[in-house]
Image (cartoon, helix red, strand yellow):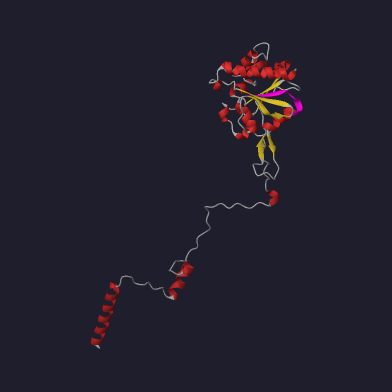
Amino acid sequence: MLRRGRRECSFRQARAAAAALLPGRVRRRPAASVRVAAREAGTGTGDRSGRRRRGPRTGRRRVARQAPDQMRARPPPRCDPSCEMRGHGSQKSDRTVAARSAVPDVLEPGLDVVFCGINPGRVSAAAGAHFANPRNDFWRLLHDADFTPRLMESSEQLELPRFGLGLTNAAYRTTPGSGDLRRADFAGSAERLQLVARELRPRIIAFVGKEAYRGAFGERPSLGLQERRLADSRLFVLPSTSPANAAVPYPERLRWFEALADLSRASGS
């Protein structure tokens, strides 16, 4: 009997020592009676049913949906008065800015010569007058070629129709120089000049600078009288009077203005 007790004790000690050497011992769940007692006491025992549930998240803020009749309608997009709408079939933008010139045209029916510049420069736009840059030779050439009886200022441009003369531009957008223009700036220029020729019937439309003619018609001209006509109006190309064209001497530019004056007088006789 004593031996049997010693063997059982040795067996328990050996099993306890072996269990201590195991690296990861599996934890057993408590007995059912222990779990029931723990639930009644309100303490956790490892049973999932005894875990405390987490409350709803409060980090996000829920926004209640509004009924369609409660939604505020967005105001329509604002349109600048200088804009016009295109048709829905256009592949380009639905809005395009209508052309506006800072320098008004000086036109009347039955003029002898309508001078067509390239576009308004900054000085002309600020003054609201054609060829207003004091370094521009236009007004001086006009007088020296006997188009006007005296040297006129750009501020006197509205008096030109008294001498059978008018003013317009091939492009209306103001830029520091003609080199800043884009092809789109001349869109509709040929049609507009065609309308001037048909409705106002000037004898000659004179382009002040090759770029004015090229911008309107898309082809590089030579100086002087052109083969092209607009209605009954003849077309003439002059050298640019801009200070940027200072490489062309003044006497040469005057020669072309005088040739235009001779053509104008011959057309009027």
Q: Nearer the viewer, residue 108 or 75?
A: 108
Whole-percent x, y for residue 227 in the image: 67, 29
Q: Nearer the viewer, residue 268 or 186?
A: 268
Q: Is residue 97 left or right of residue 31?
A: right
**Is residue 104 visible in this depiction of the protein?**
no
Q: Is residue 115 left or right of residue 37?
A: right
Q: Residue at x 69, y 49 (%)?
A: 70
Whole-percent x, y for residue 250 in the image: 57, 16
Quadrant position of the C terminus in the picture: top right
User: Does residue 240 belong to the magenta stretch?
Assistant: no
Q: Is residue 29 left or right of residue 253?
A: left
**Is residue 216 visible in this depiction of the protein?**
yes
Give the number of callouts: 0
Q: Residue at x 70, y 21 (%)?
A: 113
Indicate whether 16 appears above or below 131: below
Whole-percent x, y for residue 213 in the image: 63, 28
Please state the extent of the stretch shown in magenta in the rendering. 198-208
Q: Nearer the viewer, residue 25 or 191?
A: 191
Farthest top residue in view: 150
State which quadrant residue 44 falls in.
bottom left
State which quadrant residue 245 falls in.
top right
Q: Nearer the viewer, residue 34 or 93?
A: 93
Q: Residue at x 23, y 87 (%)?
A: 3
Farthest bottom residue in view: 1
Indicate whether 130 appears above or below 70: above
Indicate whether 134 appears above or below 174: above
Q: Is residue 96 left or right of residue 51?
A: right
Quadrant position of the N terminus in the picture: bottom left
Whole-percent x, y for residue 165 in the image: 70, 19
